[in-house]
Image (cartoon, rainbow, N blue to C red):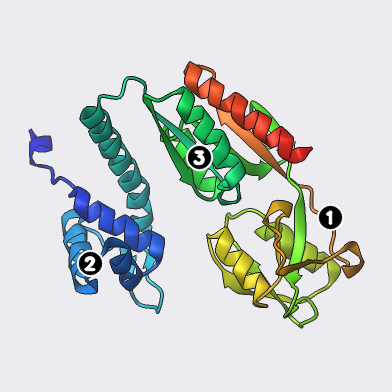
Amino acid sequence: MNSLHMANLDLDLLRTFIAVAESGGFTSAARRLHRTQSTVSQQILRLEDSAGAVLFDRSSRLVVLTEEGERLLGFARRILKLNDEAFEVLANGLAEGVLRLGVPEDFTTQMLTRVLAGFARRHPQLRLDVTSDLSARLLHAYDMQELDIVLVKQLVGSRTAIASWPERLRWIDSRVHPAFARDPVPLAVFPQRGMYRDDMIEALNASGRRWRISYCSTSLTSLQAAVADGLGISLLPARAVTRRHRIIGPRSGLPVVNTVELALHCRPDASPAVRQLADCLIALCQSIQD
């Protein structure tokens, strides 16, 4: 009987909550949602009142999630994904349903979209839902049954996959405004638990170089720009190196990092469509390695 009186989480408020969490602030979320900042703030207050918990720490310049907010974020994403999938299936009468793929940001390229477009043409009644995120988040979503197949970065041999390939990493600096000679050397990194961050710090410590984190972002594009503009050096996949970057060679004293691999995961009981997509991704990754 008590369950009949439990409060329901408003889906619109959850969408606003996710936007604030992902954008890092109320102003950015308001632009993303095409709403006023005051409306976004009021919606978050309503959600906090409904949830009975403070979801954001507003004491610093950056708006960050509290422990309760971090706990809710995963549930919010799952709730909205299920809601959107249910609506899509009911609205369009999809025969095959939805195939949910997770890939790292540096794989959202023309090569991948060409492969996915060909796959989609062979499965016109299947909606392909592609999520791009940090590998740790993609693996968590996969384990929570929120994704059907994922291509991720992981430590070599840390987890069994249906296929894996060594990830080619490069130390990069700005071609115009080099940062490596500075002391301490500034670093442009992914957040904690992001790939390559620990490798960078361990390598610099081993070489005796002082360092400081000068730029941190979850976005590969943002890190590429930060390095190109001289905010710091970084360690990124070879395919992420642009003409605005300079590769820092072995003579710099920095080691070759080969601790990371690309890994493709899908479940043994995956549908025929998922297995066909897996074959397409394996062929793509092999062509990149060649």
Quadrant in the picture for the C terminus: top right
Residue linked to disc 3: 102
Quick one: SS at disc 3? strand
Q: Which residue is mark 2?
A: 35
The residue located at (63%, 44%) in the rendering is 153
Cα distance in 3D space between marks 3 and 1: 28 Å
The residue located at (8%, 41%) in the rendering is: 5
Q: Quadrant of residue 32?
A: bottom left
In the image, residue 82 above or below residue 15: above
Mark 2 touching mark 3, by CB under 8 A? no
- The residue that disc 1 covers is 256
Q: Can residue 288 be seen here?
A: yes
Q: Nearer the viewer, mark 2 or mark 1?
A: 2
Mark 2 vs mark 3: which is more N-terminal? 2
How crowded pointer 2 is (Cα within 10 Å; few <14, some 14-19, many 20+) is rated as: few
Q: Is residue 76 left or right of residue 239?
A: left
Q: In this view of the protein, which residue sits in the foreground, 138 or 54? A: 138
Q: Is residue 63 above or below residue 141?
A: below
Q: Amino acid at mark 1?
A: Val
Mark toward the start of the polypeptide (2 vs 1): 2
Question: Which of the 4 quarters of the picture holds residue 124?
Answer: top left
Cα distance, mark 2 to mark 1? Answer: 47 Å
Q: Callout 3: few (<14), some (14-19), or many (20+) C-alpha neighbours within 10 Å?
A: many
